[in-house]
Image (spheres, rainbow, N blue to C red):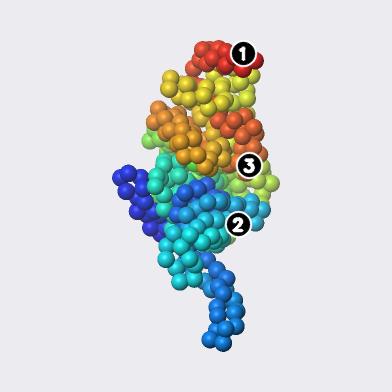
Amino acid sequence: MKLLHKDIEKDNAGQVTLMPDEAEDMWHTYNLVQVGDSLRASTIRKVQTESTTGSVGSSRVRTTLTICVEAIDFDSQACQLRVKGTNIEENQYVKMGAYHTIELELNRKFTLAKKNWDTVVLDRIEQACDPAQKADVAAVVMQEGLANVVLVTPAMTLVRAKVEVTIPRKRRGSCSQHEKAMERFYMAVMQAILRHINFDVVKCILIASPGFVKDSFFTYLFKEAVRQDNKLLMENRSKFMLVHSTSGHKYSLKEILCDPAVTSRLSDTKAAGEVKALDDFFKMLQHEPDRAFYGVAQVEKAADALAIDTLLISDKLFRHQDVPTRSRYVRLVDSVKDNGGNVRIFSSLHVSGEQLTQMTGVAAVLRFPMADLSETEEDSSSDEN
């Protein structure tokens, strides 16, 4: 997704112009467009024309319409998004107030205006438009004197840094020039990793090379991390994985990602991370039930007590047509973030998201037990009986 224009006022009203450039962007757009928004986009309209002789014909014309959104239909199989609404701007082909369905298309821009851009929607735009937010796999493909630092997103690979250092050949009786050059090379690659890889997002960093270059670099990287007391690298050591490649060029990435050992490791990306978060919640519910709750009322009380460590919430809730209800979920997310908690927004298209939806769509793992919440739950259930 490309962000072409953004104009949001202090009262959070305003508009953004976006261009979807891959199928996945339609899912993001589905989560951005809400009933009551206005959507401006290019569309095809069937128009009836009457000739001077009185004969009536019809033709299809491309025009730009602005509609007030009344219904949104997303086809998850085809990744197609249709938005139905009434025309709210003068147009030579479509009367004011006439109904029209706009089908949003790849590589065709649209402008979305809202009376209130909340933090969840703005985060969604940032996530959709910043490839680094989606890239939960990174790779360093290297050989002597050449390294490519690459981010792997669901739809593309992005070379974020290319490191090239001239390495002198080893000479009989003296290898010092070669070793100094390799050290300079390794240091440059280390700096590129620290500059371009977001360790909060990336779940796995592949280091690939022919021969033993990858092993030597890995040894250097963590020896240097200890010397510099670089906690970021040391805490993320388990994310690194060494694999063989035929060269240090970007095209070697394809063979690396086909390696069975790599594919099994890469299963722990965003979707698998959601599965693990839900699994952790169920384990907590079983072993320490006073630290795991679901249902918006209980979770809100835990948030008020600043007790939430991890909030699990389905993106389906943010598509609620009732504005006060949607605002309630947005406030919950903001509250948890403001108090240092983690927020995981689950995709309702994923199996873990479906499971969470069956449990009200909201769950939380707490920092400390809250027995009184369990008692409240029991009281409310006995009242219902």
Using the rendered view, name the quadrant where residue 10 is placed: top left
Q: Residue at x 49, y 35 (%)?
A: 325
Residue 68 showing in the rendered view: yes
Name the residue nearer the viewer: 263 or 189: 263
Q: Residue at x 45, y 24 (%)?
A: 303
Q: Earlier in the sequence, mark 1 or mark 2?
A: 2
**Amino acid on which the number 1 mark rests in the picture:** Ser
Give coordinates of residue 51: x percent, y percent.
55, 84
Residue 80: mark: 2
Q: Earlier in the sequence, mark 2 or mark 3?
A: 2
SS for dot 2: strand
Residue 240 showing in the rendered view: no
Which residue lies under the disc numbered 3? 350
Circle 2 crowding by C-alpha within 10 Å: few under 14, some 14–19, many from 20: some
Q: Earlier in the sequence, mark 3 or mark 1?
A: 3
Q: Mark 3, mark 1: which one is toward the viewer?
A: 1
Circle 1 crowding by C-alpha within 10 Å: few under 14, some 14–19, many from 20: few
SS for dot 1: helix
Which residue lies under the disc numbered 1? 382
